[in-house]
Each structure stands twice: as C-alpha cells, then as structure tokens.
Image (cartoon, rainbow, N blue to C red):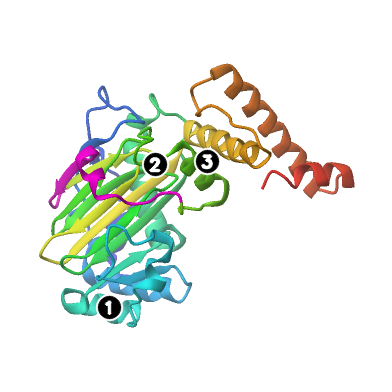
Amino acid sequence: MNAAVASAVIQTYPQPLIEFDPNEFDPWRIQPVHHRLVDHPLLQMPQLLALADRLDARGSIRTHGNDATAGTPFNDATRLHPNRRSATETLADIQQAQAFLSLLNVQIDPLYREFVGTVLDSVRPLVEPRDPGMCYRGGWIFVSSPRTVTPFHFDKEHNFLLQIRGTKRVFVWDANDTVVASELARDRFHHCHERKLLVWDESFRERARVFNLRPGEGAYMPSTSPHMVENGDDTSVTMSFTYYTRATRRDALLHKTHAMLREKGFSPPPVGAAPLLDAGLLALAQLRRRVRQVARLGGESGATAFAEDDR
C-alpha cells in the first residue's frame, strides 16, 4: 500500500468531512451538503482501478450499459442492458465505455472500511443528536460514462451522496411521497427487497427535489427516498456513505410487519398514521424476532414454526 494513501485513511480530522448545518438537520428531510473528499487519494482513478479488481474477485460489482433509462426496472438493469467488459476494463476506458459501474459495499475491503468509518465518524456527532444509533455503515462508489442514467429506485439506508468528479443531475423525492412510491411499494420493499411496485412516470420530475451536483457538493437523502440520476457530459465519480439508525430499523420493521398483514388479508393504515397501532405491532414484531433467535439456538419446534414467519 502506498504510504501516502495509508496515512490519508488513518488521519484524524478536526472538522467533519461532510458539511451541513446540524441545527437544520432533519434525518427525514432531503437536503444539500458539501464535502472535503474531492482530492482524497482513495477516490482517484488508480486506487479505484485497484479496488475494482479486488471487489470483482468477490462479486461486489454491479454494471450496466448506458442505454438504460429512468424507467428501466432497477433490479433488472444489469440483465436488460449488459456491459460485457470486466470492471477494470470498463474503468480503464470509462470515458468511452458507455457504461455505469457500481463498486458495492466497499467497506468489505479493509482499506476502504477504514475510510468509510473515518468519514462517518467525522459527522456522527452532528447526526446522533437528531437520529441516534448509527450502525451498519457502508460505502458505494459509482463511476459512469458521459450521459449515463441510474434508473429510478429507492434504498433502505440513509445516504450522503457526494460528487467527486464530473457533474450529474440527481432527482430525489420525499420519503413520504405516496404518489411517487406507494405505501404498498415501501411495505413490499422492506419485506422482500422487491422494487416491482416502484414504477417510473415522466410526470414525477415535477415533484422532485433536483440537485445539479459538482465536485465538492452532495445531497442527503433519507431511507426510501426514491431517486434517479442523469450523468453530465463527462465521466462521473460519486460516492455514497450510508447507514441505518434506530429510526430506520423501526421504520423497516413496521413496513415489513404491514406487508405480512397484507398477505393475510388485512389493510393496515400507513406507517406513522396510527401511533398506538404502530407501537403494538412493533412490540409484537420484536417479540417474534426474539423467539426466532431463541429457535435458532435450539428452541422447541413450535417456537421454530412461529418464528419462521418473521423472515
């Protein structure tokens, strides 16, 4: 490992590496941010090429061609618009590759795990007072050819999306916008990671918060905020720093429980609309989870059968 690269990772930072006003921070509100990572050595192309090679060997790469559109089903983009080149071949010629490349869960690489931890540790004191319990921290690096589109989708984590190189237009919708993403779509997504009910419509553009990102700029988007990205006329490098909190885990468990109720013929109100019901369902879901954990340790067969529903 290059000594300069290693020292940049382990360096302590007196100021947050992602910048926003903590007094205005709302964990469930889309908002702009700035950052100080543009020149970080781990985000330059030589290091990204080396990382892509390591992650490719572990199957932690996602890629598709730039003929994908906003309406391409996100989960099917790699199959519908395949990129035949390897990850390193794509990155080495990214300006001409006509491809989108995701380096997934970069924290599985020891060097980048330290990097992800350093960045999120620097903002944790700003986030925790409003949104405690930061956990399951991750990093995702997106490298894309000019005029490449990231299809419309949503994710489970809170997300700081930071522009490193090039420009892109990011469309983000509120996490509670049920016109763009129905309550049922969110229930299904949390229950079985299915995005089939999240369907693109061109009219959604008018409802979006739009960020025209340049290097040093970024956007914070809460869990299950639908988003879609259009790259500019040059190569783009972007990195997401993601995490869960107590609130996101509670929200996910409630949506999952609602999905299970729907499968049994019930029609629960939206998550958050009936606080007393949510509290009861959450207690029941947590109990079922504990029963399942006991069952895994060798509990009785009846408890195992009871716990099998909570997957």
Relative depth, front residue between 300 and 4 = 300
Up/down of 61 relative to 274, above or below: below
For the point 20% across and 40% down, which residue is it? 206
What is the spatial separation of the Cα atoms under label 2 and label 3, in whole angstroms?
Answer: 10 Å
- Residue shown at 21% from the left, 45% from the top: 205
Tell me where residue 134 sits by quadrant: top left
Q: Secondary structure at mark 1?
A: helix
Cα gap from disc 1 to disc 2, whole angstroms: 33 Å
Q: Position of residue 222 (x, y in %)?
A: 36, 38
Q: CA distance from mark 3 to mark 1?
A: 36 Å
- Left or right? Give the position of 216 relative to 272: left
Instruction: Rate crowding at label 1 as few (under 14), some (14 to 19) or many (20 or more) other CA atoms within 10 Å.
Output: many
Give the residue pinned by disc 1: 90
Q: Of the residues shown, which amino acid type is indicated by label 2?
A: Ala
- Comes first in the chain, label 3 or label 1: 1
The answer to which image quadrant residue 264 occupies is top right
- The amino acid type, in three-letter code, at marker 1 is Thr
Residue placed most toward the observer, 272 or 283? 272
In magenta, the rendered stretch is 197-216
Q: Which residue, given by chain and number where applicable, does mark 3 sit on?
A: 187
